[in-house]
Image (spheres, rainbow, N blue to C red):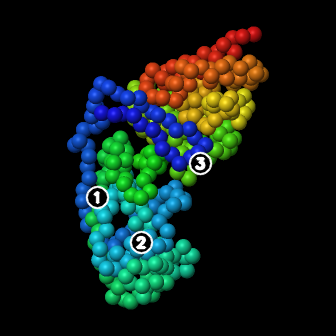
Amino acid sequence: MNHKAESGYPDMEIEKEQLYSENKDGVITVPFNPKDVDIVSQPMVISNIVEDLKDGVIILDPDFQRIPDLWDDLKQSRLIESLIIRIPLPAFYFDAGTNEKLIVVDGLQRLYSIRRFMALEKNDPDRLYLTGLEYLTEYNGYSFEMLPVNIQKRIKAQVIMAYIIRAGTPDKVRTSIFTRINTGGLTLLPAEIKNSVYRGQAADLLKELAHSEAFLIATGKKIKSSRMLDCEFVNRFLAFYLMGVEQYAGNLEDFLNDVLIRLQGESDETLGLCRRDFYKAMKYAHSIFGDAAFRKITVNGKYGRINRPLYDAVSVSLAGLSESDCEKLLNKKNKLIQKYNALLKDKEFVDIITNGTAKIQNVQSRYQKINDIFQEVLADD
């Protein structure tokens, strides 16, 4: 079994990361008890779906609505045409969550199309007017209310099949289900899935820190928020900061999920400490390293793209220092940058922040080496 994995985000400012090296042992672990998978099937009438969209029972998360490459008017119109001519739509998947609302897992773009055509107010500028229809060309330019009454009734009466992940399903199981069945044209990225699964103070904290001025300055505003990539970076920081490198067991995705589960129940005091030390880490990362923060040195001697493993090792190591020690590093930043650049030119270190970056040994090693140069500079009077 090949465990080689690479994060494939469409962001030229972030270096791709090879999380796992080749695993020749063929070890397979069971992530959870299959009995915990609790999904029920349920037919849903379009008219009821429209009412649920209007009432906010079905959640089209604003974080997803900002995605720039949702279906255009043509694709949305063709979906409505399918309803009119009674072509069955693929099944929808929802997560029932804990508040009796339905979070879309798979079928977001189809629901977004139905919402634009049938659930918005008549004077809403975002309403969909049919365009580019393949068969029913006489209805091009029509809104829902402009269609003949019998066509309106036909659309409303259409039935789709929905699969609902029931409340009480463990978070890790829900995350796995989200990942496996989210197969639409615009597949959710891991950070977006977490935002849906771990709603509440964990997701709120990630977004708060990711949108903070301190994070934006430290990363040079190069990490995009449109697909919640910025939240993934904050998630990595919080995981290693709050749970500790020594608790890392070799599966990065599980580790990132574990800290979100923990954050859901943490006290305001702990959340306050997370904020304080995150802001401190971002402040000194920028003050010491400037625009080169979290970037490897390329073969031509220049700083390259932002490197995730370097980001979490540097930021968490800074967060673990006192304010006075961070000030000492800032006062000795020339000496620190000299040691730091030497480390970035060390082939062994470059390898552990480039290949198999989620391996336990590589995680521990990068933290140890970053912490060592910090302590060497602090000890050098």
Crowdedness near tag 3: few (<14), some (14–19) or many (≥20) residues, C-alpha within 10 Å:
some
- Provide residue 278's location: percent of width, then percent of height: 61, 34
Q: Vertically, is 36 above or below 84?
A: above
**Kind of residue at badge 3:** Lys
Q: Quadrant of the N terminus?
A: top left
**What is the distance, in whole Å, between disc 1 and disc 2 at their CAs?**
18 Å
How many numbered marks have been drawn onto this rendered protein structure? 3
Work out whether residue 176 can be spotted.
yes
Q: Vertically, is 293 above or below 352?
A: below
Disc with the residue nearer the chain's start (2 vs 3): 2
Dot 2 lies on which element? helix
Disc with the residue nearer the chain's start (1 vs 2): 2
Instruction: Mark 1 and mark 3 in contact? Answer it, CB < 8 Å.
Output: no
Q: Quadrant of the C terminus?
A: top right
Using residue 255 as the reference point, say whether residue 220 is left or right of it: right
Kindly give the residue lying farthest to the left in the view shown.
35
Which residue position holds label 2? 114
**What is the distance, in whole Å, between disc 2 and disc 3 at their CAs?**
28 Å
Which residue position holds label 3? 224
Closer to viewer: mark 1 or mark 3: 3
Disc with the residue nearer the chain's start (1 vs 3): 1
Instruction: Mark 1 and mark 2 in contact? Answer it, CB < 8 Å.
Output: no
Which residue position holds label 1? 163
Closer-to-camera residue (200/249)? 249
Using residue 63 as the reference point, say whether residue 135 is left or right of it: left
**What is the distance, in whole Å, between disc 1 and disc 3 at their CAs?**
32 Å
The quadrant where residue 321 appears? top right
Instruction: Mark 2 and mark 3 in contact? Answer it, CB < 8 Å.
Output: no
Closer-to-camera residue (189/13)? 13
Q: Give the residue at x 30% y 36%.
A: 31
Q: Give the residue at x 37% y 82%.
A: 135
Label of residue 153 in the image = none
